[in-house]
Image (cartoon, rainbow, N blue to C red):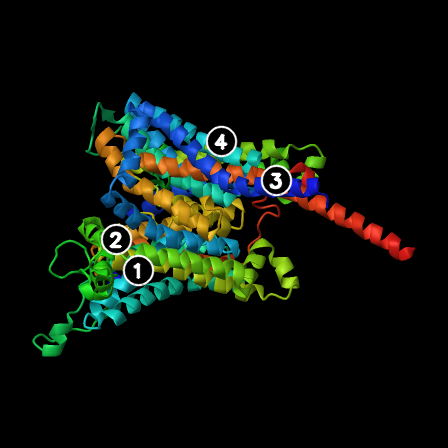
Amino acid sequence: MLNDLSSIFLNVEFYVAIVRMTTPLLLAAVGSLLAERSGVVTFSMEAMMLMGALGGIIGSGITGNVWMGILFAIVFGLLVGLAYSVMAVSVGAHQIVTSVGLNLGAVGLSAVLYALTFTRGEEVIQTVIKVSSLPLVKIPLLGDIPFIGQVFFNHLPPVYFGYVLVPLVWFILYRTSWGLKIRAVGEHPHAADTVGISVAKVRYATILFAGACSGLAGAFLSIGLLGSYMENMTAGRGFIAYTAIVFGKWQPVGVLLGTLLFGAADALQLRIQALNLDIPYQFLVMLPYVVTMIALISVVGRASWPASYGNPFKREAG
Amino acid sequence: MSKQNKLRAIWQEYLERSFSVTIPILAILAAFAFSGLIILAWGSSPFAAYAALFSGAFGSPNAIATTLQRLTPLVFTGLAVAYGYRGGFFNIGAEGQLYMGAIAAVWVAITFPDLPEWLLVPFCVLASGLMGLVWILLPAYLKARRGINEVLSTLLMNYIAIQYFEWVIRVDHIQKGILLFGGVEPVWTFQNWLGIKDATQPHPKSAFIVESAHLPSLKSLLESNLIANLFGGADWYQELLNITALGRISLAPLLGVLVVIFIYFLMFKTVTGYRSRAVGINPEAARFMGINVPRTLFITALISGTLAGLAGGMEVLGTQHRVIPNFLVNAGFDGIPVALIGQLNPLGVLLSATFFGALRAGANKMQVITSVPVAVVYIIQALAIVFAIAGTTVDIGSTLKKKRIAREMEERGKLQHVKGEVSNA
């Protein structure tokens, strides 16, 4: 047993898997961080990811071009983001409740749209549809470094986008006037409003950005890792990404660490399953959720939520 | 107050009340209209599809029996969410609590098959509720004592529960007979002590629970000596006996209605309910009123978890009599829209659970007759919830109410003013 476990940790594939399993969580979580910092609860990431996964399959399946799949995924994610913005910002509805509604709706809508797209006449195609999926891209030079090159620089394209996203979001938040506006809206929307920042505009923009990134994260699952679509294939990853945000206390680097933790738990779980040990696999599938729960209990505590977190902004409410 | 003012007040109140009922109904209608567009895109007639849906839900005694079976777990999970939400504890872990409750009910029925019926059935029901309570203990503690967001913790507990469920129905349960007659020495490991799998089946299914653990059906109640002696001669009694669908309706829906009434009283007519609603509306204000907020939150959560656990127990004892993978798809998660469309009111929950149950029951017939996929039903649900949330947020009813209260305050102020002048003079 110990030998088996050490063989996991010595195998380079384990580290490759960590990067692979972290990426969808990272894209969604860090992508949604701007919206979170502007005071919006992005619990609807699950819906955005699921529709993104579907968009990837539809785009790639119809056109045969995997990059059209990516485009569709981003557009689908944006559409969910738009729906969420209208509800959360313009209507001012309860954000978590709306998110739960969207998440439920995405399950049904994705199933119908999938069937609509891949049905000929009356008969629904039962077999799993394989579409062209993303290629592995090896970065020249860097990819040739032993171990590090294999772990970090021989991946599907969205992984590299993830590498860029963390510093990008950090830079936007702390080094640009946009970031200042976003944080101002999140901490004190009324003050921001008084100095002429449009709270609604900022929140719309950040939610749409979250939608695009989460859509891409979904596409990474469907046309990246699997090359096909399964009903409800995100399986709660959007929620884990949300946990990572809380875990990382709304800091880009913290969120990165959070997603790495869950990615590693996921990778470990998959590797142990492959070893055929005497542990029932259900307990392994449980692992990331248990890790998240423990993280929630031990680390998070009374976290530093953005001050106006989850509150819709109304001007007259002063 | 003049007569005219009185009439106006009555009219205003009528408007306020009717809006809280019309919003969900309008939301549901709008959801049907929008989904009709999707059905059109599918290439079918929405009217034919909805007609099939309706007849699949209410068209025959059998259809009604199916609807009742579908709506029962939703009543319980809807109540669980509504009670928690009103008390400031947004329990989205009903799914996990339901699974754990179902496991507990099956486990008790399999482990103690020799108990008499009058003892075994309540024992199973109790076990399912208790297990739901156990499964919410940790999130409840974290929320009440450490202020950790319950949405996240209850959600994570779902995934853990579902995986645990998947394991437990794959593990053989030790046979009591073997133990008693000593043929094979049983190995009392943790695994086969907890397991509930039917050992004779290759597939992961729990064994069927013994008949004495079933919730009695309406038919068996009708055939019981008491009722047969009372009404045995009546024509309608004989006709009722001929309806075979009655055999498929257990006591569970009836118990559901009783629990709805119980929760209604708990929520609106008891100190416990008053405290939890006060905490739900404004914890700070509740604290100033002398309410122990953490304690109240904790109790609210436990009640919510128990209700969700009972949902699993009712399904197992009343309808399916065993558990299989995915034995109740999403009934826990759907408790959330059921509660919200029911305006977080127990009676509203009963109505909206009926709506959701009917959608479920009719969906298959819709697919068979018009080839519109079952998933359309989920879109109808989602649209209904989104519209209902939007409607409640804009909420004309509560705007009217605020205006009325403001006017009343103003009038009262005038009265005070007049009184003051009189006393001054």
Q: Is disc 2 in the same subunit as disc 4?
A: no
- Which comes sooner in the sequence, label 3 or label 2? 3
Label 3: few (<14), some (14–19) or many (≥20) C-alpha neighbours in 10 Å: few
Residue that badge 2 annotates: B249
Tell which circle, 1 or 3, labels the residue nearer the N-terminal end.
3
Q: Circle 3 sits in a helix, a strand or a loop, which is it? A: helix
Residue B161 x %, y %: 33, 57
Q: Label 2 sits on what residue type?
A: Ile
Give percent across and percent down for residue A30. 48, 41
Name which residue type carries label 1. Gly
Q: Chain of mark 1?
A: B
Circle 4 sits on which residue? A82
* Three-letter amino acid code of the residue under disc 3: Trp
Badge 3 vs badge 2, beta-carbon distance below 8 Å = no
Mark 2 vs mark 4: give the one in front. 2
Q: Tell which subunit mark 3 falls on.
A: B
- B152 lies above or below B176: above
Q: Are marks 3 and 4 in contact (CB under 8 Å)?
A: no
Indicate the chain on which mark 2 is placed: B
Tell me how far mark 2 sits from mark 1, CA to CA: 15 Å
Measured from the top left, where is residue B119 in percent x and y?
27, 72
For mark 3, what is the residue?
B11
Question: Residues under labels 1 and 3: Cα distance?
Answer: 45 Å
Decide if residue A229 is in sight here. no
